[in-house]
Image: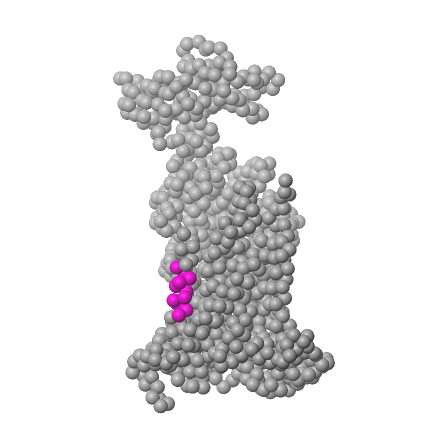
Amino acid sequence: MISVRKVSKSFGRVQAVQDVSLEIRAGEFFSLLGASGSGKTTLLRMIAGFEAVTAGQILIEGQEMQDLPPHLRPINMVFQNYAIFPHLNVHDNIAYGLQRLRLPKVDQARMVDEMLEMIALSGYGMRKASQLSGGQMQRVALARALILKPKVLLLDEPLGALDKQLREQMQLELRGLQKQLGITFILVTHDQEEALTLSDRVAVMANGWVIQVDTPAGLYDHPKNRQVAGFVGTMNFFDAVVSVHGQDRVADVAGLGRQMLNGQAGPHGNCAKVLVAIRPESLVLSSTEPGPGKPSVPGKVEARQYLGGRQILHVAVEGRATPVAVSTFAHRGEDSWAGSEGRPVWLTWGPEAINVIDPD
Amino acid sequence: MTLSAGQSLRVVPSSALVRFLHRHEGWRGYLLMAPALLLMAAAIIFPIGMTLVMSTWSLSGYDTVTTPGLSNYTAMADHPMFRVLILRSLTISLTCTAFTVLLCYPMAYYVAFHGGRYKALWMIVMTLPFWTSYLLRVFAWKVVLGYEGVLNTALLGLGIVQEPVSAFLYSQTAVTIVLAHSWAAFALLPMYVSLEKIDRSYLEAAADLGDSPARRFWRITFPLSLPGVVAAFIMMFVPTVGEYITPAMVGGPDGMMIGNLIQAMFGPMNNWPAGAALAVVMMLTIGLAGLVFVVLDRLLRR
Amino acid sequence: MARYTGFHAPNHTLAIYAAVFAFVLYLPILFIPIFSFNSGVYVKFPLEGFTLQWYVNLLGREPLKAAFWNSVKIAAAVSVLSTVIAVPAALAIARYRMPGKAPAVSFMMLPLVLPGLIMGVALLGLLNRMGVTLSLVTVTIGHMVICLPYAISVLLPRFIGFNRSLEEASADLGEPPLRTFWRVTLPCNYPGILACVLMTFTISFDEYFMAFFLSGPKSTLPMYIWGQLRFPQDFPSLLALSTLILLFSFVLIFTSLRLSKVGQTAQTGALK
């Protein structure tokens, strides 16, 4: 559907986007996730046509688009600040792109009304942009773009300006709308939660490079490197050295001791320095020493972060400077970990908890 | 009816030019700037080039001799009148620039730091007269300073002087005062801008560290506003040194400046090559002064 | 312990200074309207009596009428043409990254720092050499050169402050650049553009140097005034004329400055 092939963009000496290649499928909800300055917005603006590519190709259904100005591309966009035309009312904003199609006024009006109904703003047609709330502007921006039935809808941090509650509601609506219309959505966001909630696939970007493209679950469970792992969710990192003993591979992990590695991806050679990454929720905490058979390590609770439905306990272990974060559910009533600071505990984990990734 | 998906996809066989312009933002920009740039190039480069060429010509009787030569320049070096006029222009211009900058600084400071919500209104009030007819503003001064003008008749009426003071009009002082008054906005604006830009938190930090208001001003506000002061100097000096309406109206014979001579050369004296040479000298003077200020500015910014 | 007075505590000395400064700034031009209603022929105190005869005197002067219409024609042409040229230039400066932009902009601002006299004689020399007959057209060209830097300086901050994504949204919805300008940029920026027209109109209307050197046989209003200054008996009528011109210019410029400010706040308001 959309192919981005070896696209680069430089502003003077600054490399904003570096050699990015992506294949985005028809009907897919695709996200570009990254911190500010990662190049995600520049990449989106190149797809929309607001920035020219320095090198590379952008194809939509096999047609080269990279040298076309934005008004000739079958793409529409929802802007970060909505870009609702302040001098037009809601109706004229939504009908803006219809004018050049020279449709009869009646048809135009009916299409706009359908759109207003879809975004649940029927009867708001005569309102000025300044009379709308943030969420309503957001919907008008969506309707204005979708009325043209684009093949691809681009969304540039569309929910960034909304408060948390509204944002979560809009996330659900966006996802529903996309499934209903079957249009390809490309979303730019710095909010990993948003990317994971909405997307079919996510491309994580940093410093202009695309680091990893995967499904949300894939990113979460098998981050390719420290950047991705750190960006998507919380992660404990441990320095480790791999050694190979015949058929078996073993890692000496700082703070956790010797671990068997069965089939994990990652650097495999003997004496390879690696990073072992473990999610806080993959660790299990117990007040008593667990029996043999499962790997375990003793520690001491240093601090507790109560987060409502769950809590994070920071456990100091020997051989490691920073405490290990462990996430557990906080049960109502029987709050066994309240005031647990200083208590000796044991950490255990299953073999699947261990991710081996590149150290840099 | 509704649009079918992709109806808006018009794969227009766009021209090579459209594709080129999309790829090259700089060219797009210069295309939009082209009319303005061309007009300016045609109206600045060619005329000034022409002036340079013309300054090497000479006059023989009523005919212009177009063989290049430096006779106009040597005449300027030989004739003391030119030197006197140039020096006088520089003196008048520098004096009035210095006074104006000095007088405008507190004003700019007041608006920038104490203007409150009337800042914009203050700036309009301060710059409004500047936009109106220059000729009329000088004319107004003639009314004020004239032999039987406002100032003299007022002083007479109050018994401060026994007879009208002729020195008010037709003197270098009059020229200096009127120039200072007419171009004040040029000095005010750059200083206001640089004062306005100063981050107030620096001052708060200085106060926090125990500086008195006076010390805050001399240690922070003043140094940070110096680029604006330098810009005010340039903005003021350049137009005033080339002035000729003011000296012609309120200068009298003693107040004539180089501009009057240039105007006369192109007008009644009808010696264009000599006028062109004078214009070149004036441009060089301005250029040199500008260079000095730019160097000063660079040193200040370091 | 001394009470902390804050930074924006009123400074009375400075406030008085500012008031005096503003008063002195306007003082000389105040005398023009005052004496234009004075029945005495001589411009001196005490005032003699109120009269409108100097205004009446202006009526029916054919050269004045001609000069006035010449000035209006030139100013109208200059304001429209220089705005039409300045708008795309200012847009390009505000929007595009282009190599050599800073020197190009400085070059266009050059007439701000070149004395009008030099610009006038230099253009005169060139036009004369090219064999162009001096006319109102040559004055118009001269005035456009003077007005363009001002026009760009008035427009540039508006365009920089203008939310660029509105234009991008229009392009994104399929409108080509010219129609985007027509449907979005113009309606959203008309106060600034109108301010530009008014300002360049006033500058041209009041300009003297270029007109003096480039006008040929026809004269403009400032040239008419300059010419009449030789006749002392005509002084009061000139004061009357000047009062009218000053009033006209003040209204135009004040509107222009207000408009550009209003435009700015409207834009930032729309941006939230």
Can residue C139 be seen? no
Q: Give above or below for A217 relative to B85.
A: above
The answer, for residue A290, to whether it is visible in the render is yes
Q: A355 or B119, which is in the foreground?
A: B119
Q: Is residue B261 magenta?
A: no
Q: Is residue B223 above or below residue B186?
A: above
Residue drawn at 60 percent across, 36 percent down: A165
Instruction: Place residue B42 in its image quadrant.
Output: bottom left
Tell me the magenta residue range. B285-295
Residue displayed at 47% across by 65% down? B235
> Is C53 located above or below residue A252 in the figure?
below
Q: Is residue B291 magenta?
A: yes
Tell me residue A267's x, y (percent).
Answer: 32, 27
Residue B36 in picture, x, y percent from top left: 44, 67
Q: Is residue A70 left or right of residue C49?
A: left
Prevalent SS, magenta region:
helix
Residue at 51% from the left image edge and 51% from the top image edge? B218
Question: Residue C205 in the image: x percent, y percent?
Answer: 55, 75
Q: Nearer the viewer, residue A289 or C150?
A: C150
Q: Is residue C74 above or below residue B269?
A: above
Q: Residue furthest top?
A: A291
Residue C132 location in percent, x, y? Answer: 42, 82
Towards the viewer: B260 or B10: B260
> Residue at horizontal 46%, vertical 14%?
A346
Task: Tell me the quadrant of the picture where the C terminus of chain A can be found.
Answer: top left
Q: Quadrant of the N terminus of chain A?
A: top left
Count how many numbered circles sit on residues in the image.
Answer: 0
Q: How is the image coloured?
A: one colour
